[in-house]
């Protein structure tokens, strides 16, 4: 039986082998380890193949959390994910088990592992700001500079998305956007030990190509067509999923399938590089190129004092 509030995180780029390693470790624990998926797109029901979700058999073998939380027609934010992850973690600890966070969505991981203070969203304010931004972006930036000089100093005046978001939060929350922390490049003390599974870029490129072609053989295109044809279709956030986004061009715009597949593989490789860079910037991550060594470290953390969440 595990002690209260024990956890460890397994991080790394997509296709690095995290999921297989995590499943193996949890399976060997005889139920003592439960997996919390830290993936922005696995929260959507029906988005299965292209998010590399565990199979039904794997879910019967090991307890997984944070999968299939919402319909693909719904928007889903990092703040919502943080709330669901906290609830799931508490449920695992209440059962006397260990939490194993696994995933490659860096922002979602930071939100949970570091307990980030995440600003809420204000859709009506955002809609009004986006309408103004098309012709009044300089004026919006000046307004942000008056209301939150620090936030304005941290971004480019021409970056519409970031200017709108900063002003949306400043107006909606009635507090400066900059008051929500020092930013993602500020790394505090270790709250949850992070074990990184490394892989060379050449290996990642090869794995992603083989994996995407395998998904196509298993019916990924049919999955995308079903999602588009369902009531409500796919939300803006769901459509951002790499692989789905490219195949949507074939389904909705009749773009040549081979071109969409090749683009999906290219974008997957770029995603892996971004993820790798994200985790490499965090000096707290302990890196392992060997899966067996990574698994041994995960076990060591959960069986010792390093496995306790530090608040």
Image (cartoon, rainbow, N blue to C red):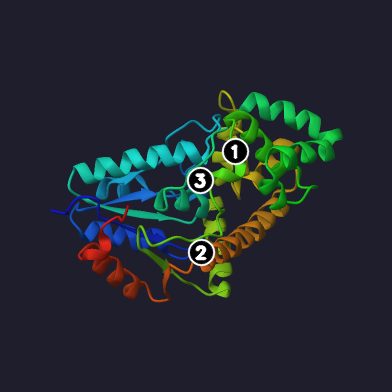
**Mark positioned earlier in the residue sequence (1 or 2):** 1
Residues tagged 3 and 1 counted as in contact (Cβ below 8 A): yes
**Mark positioned earlier in the residue sequence (3 or 1):** 3
Q: Tell me the residue at 43%/50% (across/down).
A: 38
- Evaluate whether residue 178 shows in this view: yes
Q: Nearer the viewer, mark 2 or mark 3?
A: 2
Q: Nearer the viewer, residue 76 or 125?
A: 125
Q: Quadrant of residue 19?
A: bottom left
Q: Residues within 10 Å of mark 1 (few under 14, many from 20)?
A: some
> How far across and down, in percent of the image, does residue 58 sit?
31, 50
Q: Nearer the viewer, mark 1 or mark 2?
A: 2
CA gap between label 1 and label 2 equals: 22 Å
Q: Tell me the residue at 56%/51% (across/down).
A: 216
Q: Which mark is residue 107?
A: none
* Residue that mark 2 sits on: 279
> How far across and down, in percent of the image, does residue 108 sit?
48, 48
CA gap between label 3 and label 1 equals: 9 Å
Q: Residues within 10 Å of mark 3 (few under 14, many from 20)?
A: many
Q: Nearer the viewer, residue 56 or 130?
A: 130
CA gap between label 2 and label 3 equals: 16 Å
- Asked whether, in this view, residue 251 is left or right of residue 71, the answer is right
Q: Which mark is residue 237?
A: 1
């Amino acid at each position: 039986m595990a002690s209260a509030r024990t956890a460890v995180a397994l991080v790394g780029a997509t296709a690095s082998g995290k999921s297989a390693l995590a499943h193996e470790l949890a399976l060997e624990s005889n139920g003592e380890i439960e997996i919390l998926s830290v993936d922005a797109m696995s929260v959507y029901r029906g988005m299965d193949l292209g998010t590399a979700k565990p199979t039904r058999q794997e879910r019967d073998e090991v307890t997984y959390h944070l999968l299939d939380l919402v319909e693909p027609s719904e928007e889903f934010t990092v703040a919502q994910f943080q709330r669901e992850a906290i609830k799931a973690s508490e449920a695992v600890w209440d059962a006397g088990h260990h939490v194993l966070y696994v995933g490659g969505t860096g922002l979602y991981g930071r939100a949970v592992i570091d307990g980030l203070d995440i600003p809420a969203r204000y859709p009506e304010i955002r809609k009004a700001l986006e309408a103004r931004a098309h012709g009044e972006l300089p004026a919006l930036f000046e307004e942000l500079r008056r209301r939150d000089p620090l936030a304005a100093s941290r971004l480019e005046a021409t970056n519409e998305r970031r200017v709108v978001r900063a002003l949306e939060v400043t107006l909606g929350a009635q507090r400066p956007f900059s008051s929500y922390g020092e930013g993602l490049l500020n790394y505090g003390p270790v709250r949850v030990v992070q074990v990184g599974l490394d892989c060379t870029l050449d290996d990642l490129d090869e794995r992603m190509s083989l994996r995407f072609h395998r998904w196509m053989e298993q019916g990924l295109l049919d999955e995308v067509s079903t999602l588009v044809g369902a009531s409500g279709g796919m939300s803006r956030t769901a459509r951002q999923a790499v692989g789905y986004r490219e195949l949507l061009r074939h389904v909705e715009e009749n773009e040549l399938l081979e071109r969409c597949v090749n683009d999906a593989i290219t974008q997957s490789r770029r995603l892996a590089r971004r993820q790798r860079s994200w985790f490499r910037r965090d000096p707290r991550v302990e890196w392992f190129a060997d899966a067996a060594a990574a698994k041994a470290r995960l076990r060591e953390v959960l069986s010792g004092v390093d496995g306790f969440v530090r608040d």
